[in-house]
């Protein structure tokens, strides 16, 4: 009788392990202030072999849109809702954070049994335990909560901003290398019974951009200006870190059952002087609603699900990631509020462009852009600009006067979101945190 009970227990355990192993892992890797032409597969001189490997083994998402600056993009990704609805159109600073009644992607995955790790830049609330990643669906956090740090001192405005699970850390090392090492550590030490969600937002190549001297020297030989060499070296170092994370997945036998997404949080701060010949010369940079500020490199790899070396022309936004990735792994997104993002997983899976609602991207000072398939409207300080971005990706020919009806139609599509934006600096509705207890 004891043997039968033992046998049944073993069968049940094997069944639970099989179920856990069949549930896909999710890894999201985000770079910081890196533009369209800063990856090798878009013609950059910066060496990014590991990002290129993801593209070769997966799918290039060639119409992937974000917000012009970092906190709005990260808010959109986590909530699936336009950050303009709660006044986040600029980087979050001081005691402001994403309102606590907003539901995060990490909470959806955690509720579905995932172990959840956040490693890197948070920037969704720097002050107050209630805005910590540990209160927003993550089991573990290692990194920093403000918008940027010194890569070696790990300080924000001369104060230490580096922690593991709420405990401040004074560590030596280059931040990119430390973040990659922590990602490798949690992959190796994870609970193998549970699926894993790893969110890995690097701070590279955000200012104050820094890099190891040997990598700076590597790019100095290409003849770039000093800042360009450092910028390129910081991206190179990040790519090497990504390579170590991919190697850890491979070593642990996780590659086949892991969805890996890489994208950039907004455009580059300026046009990179190390980009190669023949890159698409998108106008604009970080902070701009032009393509160079909001259209970024993105790749998705999931072996046996995504066709290797494929290229997707579906319009996709950071807003879509909550409904899309939860649909991909077969769990509910869990938000009780209406989402602005849409589930584009069927389009990605079949690699076919599907109709979708217009995409609204809010900028600062009441400016915004609306994309509807091939048309893009920008309402800015100089009035209306309308471009056919499929035929004119460099936004060289303003069609606003000739197509006034399209301008009016797209303006109307943005009203429900833009009328919710608080006047002024986009601060009014963002939550405020209490002083950290540590």
Image (spheres, helix red, strand yellow):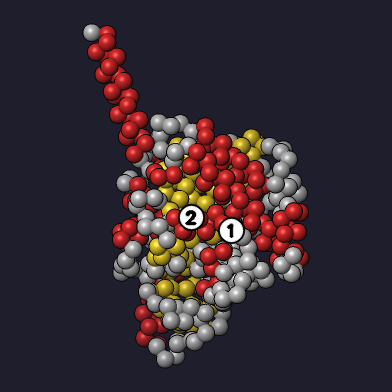
Q: Which mark is residue 365?
A: none
Name the residue rendered at 37%, 55% in the picture.
306
Name the residue rendered at 57%, 45% in the picture.
244
**Quarter-of-image position of residue 321:** bottom left
Q: Which residue is mark 1?
A: 48
Q: Position of residue 438 (x, y in %)?
A: 65, 36
Q: Position of residue 7 (x, y in %)?
A: 27, 17
Q: Residues within 10 Å of mark 1 (few under 14, many from 20)?
A: many
Q: Which residue is mark 2?
A: 54
Left or right, 202 with reference to 17: right
Q: Is residue 67 visible?
A: no
Left or right, 269 with reference to 41: right
Q: Position of residue 81 (x, y in %)?
A: 42, 58
419 above or below 385? above
Mark 1–mark 2 distance (CA, rounded to whole Å): 10 Å
Name the residue rendered at 68%, 61% in the picture.
231
């Amino acid at each position: 009788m004891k043997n039968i009970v033992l046998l049944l227990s073993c069968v049940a355990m094997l069944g639970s392990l099989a179920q856990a192993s069949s549930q896909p892992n999710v890894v999201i890797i985000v770079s910081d202030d890196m533009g369209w032409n800063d990856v090798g597969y878009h013609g950059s001189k910066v060496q990014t072999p590991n990002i290129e490997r993801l593209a070769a083994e997966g799918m290039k998402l060639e119409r992937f849109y974000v917000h012009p600056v970092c906190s709005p993009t990260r808010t959109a990704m986590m909530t699936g809702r336009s950050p303009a609805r709660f006044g986040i159109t600029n980087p979050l600073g001081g005691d402001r954070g994403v309102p606590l009644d907003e539901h995060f992607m990490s909470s959806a995955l955690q509720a579905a049994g995932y172990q959840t790790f956040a490693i890197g830049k948070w920037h969704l609330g720097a002050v107050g335990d209630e805005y910590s990643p540990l209160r927003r669906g993550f089991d573990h956090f290692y990194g920093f909560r403000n918008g940027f740090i010194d890569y070696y001192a790990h300080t924000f405005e001369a104060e230490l901003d580096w922690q593991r699970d709420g405990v401040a850390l004074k560590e030596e090392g280059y931040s990119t290398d430390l973040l990659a090492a922590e990602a490798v550590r949690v992959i190796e030490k994870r609970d193998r019974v549970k699926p894993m969600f790893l969110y890995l937002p690097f701070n590279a190549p955000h200012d104050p951009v820094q890099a190891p001297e040997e990598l700076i020297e590597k790019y100095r030989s290409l003849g770039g200006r000093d800042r360009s060499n450092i910028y390129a070296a910081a991206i190179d170092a990040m790519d090497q870190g990504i390579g170590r994370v991919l190697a850890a997945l491979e070593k642990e036998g996780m590659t086949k059952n892991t969805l890996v997404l890489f994208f950039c949080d907004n455009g580059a701060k300026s046009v990179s002087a190390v980009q190669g010949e023949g890159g698409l010369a998108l106008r604009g940079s970080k902070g701009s609603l032009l393509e160079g500020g909001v259209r970024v490199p993105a790749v998705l790899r999931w072996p046996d699900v995504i066709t290797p070396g494929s290229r997707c022309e579906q319009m996709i936004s950071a807003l879509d990631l909550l409904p899309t990735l939860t649909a991909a792994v077969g769990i509910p997104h869990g938000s009780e509020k209406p989402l602005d993002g849409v589930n584009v997983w069927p389009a990605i899976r079949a690699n076919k462009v599907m109709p979708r609602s217009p995409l609204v991207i809010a900028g600062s000072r009441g400016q915004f852009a609306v994309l509807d398939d091939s048309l893009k409207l920008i309402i800015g300080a100089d009035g209306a600009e309308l471009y056919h971005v499929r035929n004119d990706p460099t936004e060289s020919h303003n069609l606003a006067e000739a197509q006034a009806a399209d301008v009016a139609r797209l303006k109307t599509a943005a009203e429900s979101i833009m009328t919710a934006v608080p006047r002024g600096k986009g601060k009014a509705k963002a939550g405020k945190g209490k002083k950290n207890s540590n």
